[in-house]
Image (tube, rainbow, N blue to C red):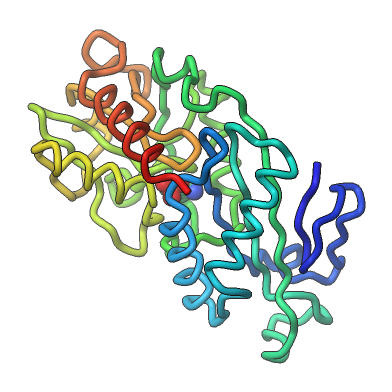
Amino acid sequence: RTVYVNGQFVPEEDAKISVFDRGFLFADAVYEVTSVLGGKLIDFDGHAARLDRSLKELGMGMPMSRDELLEIHHRLVEANGIEDGLVYLQVTRGAADRDFAYPAEDTPQSVVLFTQSKPGLANSPQADQGIRVASLPDLRWDRRDIKTVQLLYPSMAKMEAKAKGADDAWMVEDGVVTEGTSNNAYIVKDGKIITRQLGTEILHGITRAAVLRFAREAQMKVEERTFTIEEAQAADEAFVTSASAFVMPVVEIDGEKLGDGTPGPVARRLREIYLEESRKAAI
Ligand code: PMP
């Protein structure tokens, strides 16, 4: 596999990052994951805009222009023959002697991109079955709107959810659901789509923005507010969204089946609309 590291396209075994890199030592880094369908990027501009925002929130700037970034994405997709899959991008504050204080402003950032091939990404059998989620406390820091690589707690929560026989966790804080470990969470009641409002408590999902836009365009009702696990268990359906899972139905919450335990019509329809519209707009 060819990867990109600091200006160069190299075989993955030749890619090198310093042991002093702040991404490695302090998780002082942000990332993006853009999906690829039919060899094209889904919502590249949404991801580029969020990258810019995450970097700014941490006092960093974009390492290069949107066009240069796009060019690297395209070159990697092509070099690795990615039909369906994803492009991962990470930008760190760079390498410097280990110190909690940030290094000098002119310290070069580290920029790494790689691809992952996922044949049939849009036809995952999981989407036909739906996933089960287990609730766990949300123990992350409170700037989840910044897409940092501090992913240890979400990783632990995913393992705990699996140990409970579920596929993923829905994290709960102050009695209400924040989001999934790597996705935004939704319930559907009486035809209305309910999802938590944006704030620092959740990541501002690129897929979330697109799905809510498509839902409103299709005259579906959308309510952005918090909900509890109990309300979710009493809902007609539930689902999650992310760049790599698109719209994924949720059929069970803490062992309680939703409806008849199969993916609901709203989730299925939104998945179809999302995939169709995103493929059309892919670049
Ligand atoms: N929330 C969290 C915590 C995530 O990690 C992700 C995936 N990166 C999402 C939501 C979904 O965001 P997106 O639709 O931009 O992939």
- Please state if 163 lies on the left or on the right of 213 as rendered: right
- Please state if 72 lies on the left or on the right of 188 as rendered: right
Q: Which residue is at the far right?
A: 14
Residue at 87% across / 60% down in the picture? 16
- Please state if 87 lies on the left or on the right of 122 as rendered: right
Residue 107 rendering spot, x and y as whole percentages: 74, 85
Res 186 → quadrant: top left
- Please state if 109 lies on the left or on the right of 220 as rendered: right
Residue at 76% across / 82% down in the picture? 99
Q: Nearer the viewer, residue 157 or 50?
A: 50
Residue at 51% across / 29% down in the picture? 161
Q: Which residue is at the far top?
A: 260
Residue 120 rendering spot, x and y as whole percentages: 55, 22
Q: Nearer the viewer, residue 228 or 30?
A: 30
Q: Is there any visible trace of residue 138 in the rendered image? A: no
Say if 133 sits above or below 210 in the image.
above
Res 131 → quadrant: top left
Residue at 30% across / 11% down in the picture? 261
Say if 204 sits above or below 217 in the image.
below
Q: Nearer the viewer, residue 78 or 47?
A: 78
In the picture, the quarter occupied by the N terminus is top right
